[in-house]
Amino acid sequence: MTDLQGRLRASHTDRDAVIEQLRVAAGDGRLTLEELEERIEQAQSARTYDDLRALTSDLPGNSSPAVPGVSGVLELRTKHGLAQRTGHWVVPAHIVASCASGRVKIDFTGAVCSHREVLLEATCGMGEIRVIVPRGWTVWVDTLTTNMGTISNKATDPGLPDAPTLRVTGTVGLGRLKIRYPRK
């Protein structure tokens, strides 16, 4: 999560979700009753996502509150036209890109990504899916199959330790899937 996102104001629902997570952790024996009471009090007065995240960061299965617009699935689907996500946008943890004979373009260079890993499920018939990632990201092409199409991953530099990893899965029929860095 970027510094800016962590400073966003938390809602009552966000605070309640963290309090429930703390109660479960205490029930599992991970927190003492004193720690639980202290953290619940801090959660009730938390103002930002960072404040809440600090209360659960030492718990396994940490499911810190999601920043609005970051959770969920982004679906980019087209039959013959162009579907794209470019410019400034917030990256969810899961993206589905699908095209029959059209084009899908996903440009992460201006995007805000708070996830350590992003899953991209790509399905391409005779069209093209083009993915542009910033330098420093790690790209894994996992379980990607092709019929007579082309899969090209030019984003192969070693990733930075704190940068996101993009995992690409799916099927390419007669079309193309291209992954690259932005042009200079």
Image (cartoon, rainbow, N blue to C red):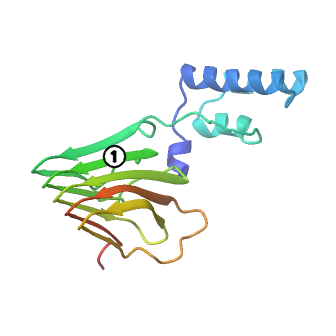
Q: Quadrant of residue 102?
A: bottom left
Give percent across and percent down for residue 107: 31, 60
Type of amino acid under label 1: Val
Name the residue rendered at 41%, 73% in the picture.
155
Q: Circle 1 — which element? A: strand
Q: Nearer the viewer, residue 21 or 102?
A: 102
Q: Nearer the viewer, residue 161 or 81?
A: 81
Give percent across and percent down for residue 83: 19, 50
- The residue that mark 1 highlights is 96
Asked whether residue 45 appears in the rendered view, the answer is no
Q: How many numbered marks does the figure carry?
A: 1
Name the residue rendered at 45%, 37% in the picture.
71
Name the residue rendered at 23%, 67% in the picture.
148
Tell me: residue 132, above or below residue 63: below
Q: For the view shown, which residue lies furthest in the front direction?
A: 147
Q: Which image quarter holds the C terminus?
A: bottom left
Q: Is residue 40 left or right of residue 82?
A: right
Name the residue rendered at 76%, 38% in the picture.
59
Give percent across and percent down for residue 110: 35, 59
Asked whether residue 157 appears in the rendered view, the answer is yes
Tell me: residue 139, above or below residue 123: below
Give percent across and percent down for residue 16: 62, 20
